[in-house]
Each structure stands twice: as structure tokens, then as C-alpha cells.
Image (tube, rainbow, N blue to C red):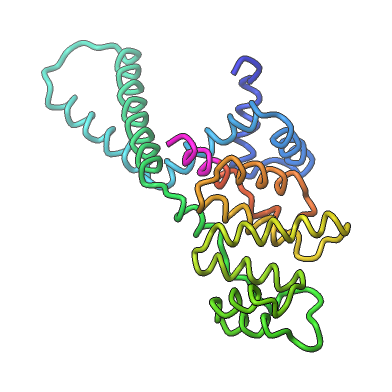
Amino acid sequence: MDNFTHNDEELLVQYLDGVLDEHTKAEVEKKLNSDTEFRNAYESLLLTKEAVKQYGLKEKVAGIHKGMMKEMQQAPIRHISSARRAVRYTISVAAALIVLIGSFMLYNFYSLSAEKVFNSGFQSYDLSTARGNEEKESVIAKAYRSKRFDDVVKLYEAGADSSKEAMFLTGMSALELKENSKAISNFKMLIAANQQNNEKLYNDDAEYYLSLSYIRNGDYDFALGLLHKIKDDSNHRYNKKVTAKLLRQIKMLKWR
């Protein structure tokens, strides 16, 4: 990272520790959205922090230190300067950290699956949170509320309701049934209809769940493109759900 400086690294560490003032925090977040190199460095630091948290490296380092001290006490007395002893200890601890973090990264890389990433972001859509409910609920909405997802798909395909709500709920039902292609088709159709009519009904919901459909279907480039669009839109309903961790996991799936 030729343009990445020590000050940038310190700034990211402070950001991760939550010690920045609101103004500086906002500047960092602005740079994360506009500077790819800066964002990559942030994701690397975040991964290291997760490794430390998950594996309890502090305790492991303490164990390494204890073992080294015991070994030094048992070994024949040799005249080694304090400076050399400190260097040897630092190198040993650093090597142990590299091994542990590397093991953590490899474990995450090989144990990660599209289904795991999908499940981490998926939450069943609750009709009670829907905006602008109709006075009289449609037959498809009733079937969806009762979790009769097969019936929702059948009713929609039979032409019982062609509204945007029915289109969206059919896509959600297909997701619940793990029919990814059908879900993708419905969500894309809804987004296209909104663009054509200059409307936004269920649009944010359709974009987010379309990205999850892409993930489970293995279409990682499509998922990343859509998730970056959501992340760049601070007014998007699902903006906060698009985390650096989610984007990093999709990239890892793509690399495999």
C-alpha cells in the first residue's frame, strides 16, 4: 500500500477502538467509502481484531511468556544482554501471533459457505412491519402471513394477484423455499417495474433480498455490486446491514 501511511493506520486503530470524536469518525467513514486502499487496510485490521477476540490471543501470549520464562529458568545460565533477551521474546511472540492469526484466517476461509453468509444476513420478512398495509389483505398476503409459502408461489403463478406486494412476497416465499432462481427473478422484476414507473414500493427490500439470493446462488459479483450500491446510499433501509465483514466474506467465497 504505497499511499497508506502510519498515521492512517493509527487512525483506523482508533476508529476500531471507538475513541474518535464524532467529526474525525465521520471523516474516517467518508474515506472508507471513497478510498479503496484505505478500506482494504481497515478490513485487514478488522480481521486481525476478530482473530484476537475469537482466539483469546492475550491469554495465549501470556502462556507463551510463562513457558519461555520457565525454559529460561531451567536452561544453563548464559550471559545474554537484556536487549537480546527482549528481541528474542518479541520475535517468539510475534511468530506465535502470526501462526494463530494465520490459522484463524485459514479456518474461516475453508469453513465459510454461501449458506452461512446468507443465514447471517437473512431475516424472515414480517408483514406487520410493511408500510401502507391495505384495508383488505390480499389472498397472497394472507398465505404469506400464515407461512404457507408454497401457496404464495402457486397463487402468484396462477395470476391471483399481480401487484408489487404480491411480486415481493412471492420472491420472499421462494427464498424461504430455497428456490433461488425464482426469488431472483421476482425481485429483479419488481425493481424493473419500479424503475419503469418511477416508484419505490418494496424497492429497498427487493434490492437487499436480491443480494442475499445472489449470495446463496453463488453469483458473488452480482451480490457485491448490489451490496456496494446499498452501502453507498445512507438513506437505504438496509444500509446498516451491509457491513465490512459481510463484504469481506463474499470476497472470500469468490476467491475459493
Magenta-drawn stretch contains 13: no
For the N terminus, which image quadrant?
top right
Magenta-drawn stretch contains 252: yes
- The magenta stretch is 248-256
Task: Identify the residue shown where x is 76% and y is 69%.
Answer: 164
Residue furthest bottom as drawn? 136
Q: Label the magenta part by its dominant secondary structure.
A: helix
For the C terminus, which image quadrant?
top left
Q: Position of residue 97 (x, y in %)?
A: 36, 31
Q: Is residue 5 above or below residue 156?
A: above
Q: Is residue 101 above or below residue 59?
A: above
Q: Position of residue 129 (x, y in %)?
A: 71, 75
Quarter of the image for residue 58 reads: top left
Q: Horizontal placement of 126 versus 132: left or right?
A: left
Which one is nearer the viewer's eye here, 65 or 190? 190
Q: Position of residue 178 (x, y in %)?
A: 49, 64
Quarter of the image for residue 168 reads: bottom right
Which one is nearer the viewer's eye here, 102 or 203? 203
Q: Is residue 219 above or below residue 187?
A: above
Task: Identify the residue shown where x is 63% and y is 66%.
Answer: 171
Which one is nearer the viewer's eye here, 74 or 140? 140
Quarter of the image for residue 72 reads: top left
Task: Identify the residue shown where x is 18% and y is 31%.
Answer: 70
Q: Horizontal placement of 24 versus 47: left or right?
A: right
Task: Identify the residue shown where x is 79% and y is 59%.
Answer: 193
Q: Is residue 44 above or below residue 114?
A: above
Q: Position of residue 205 (x, y in %)?
A: 70, 62
Q: Horizontal placement of 253 versus 71: left or right?
A: right
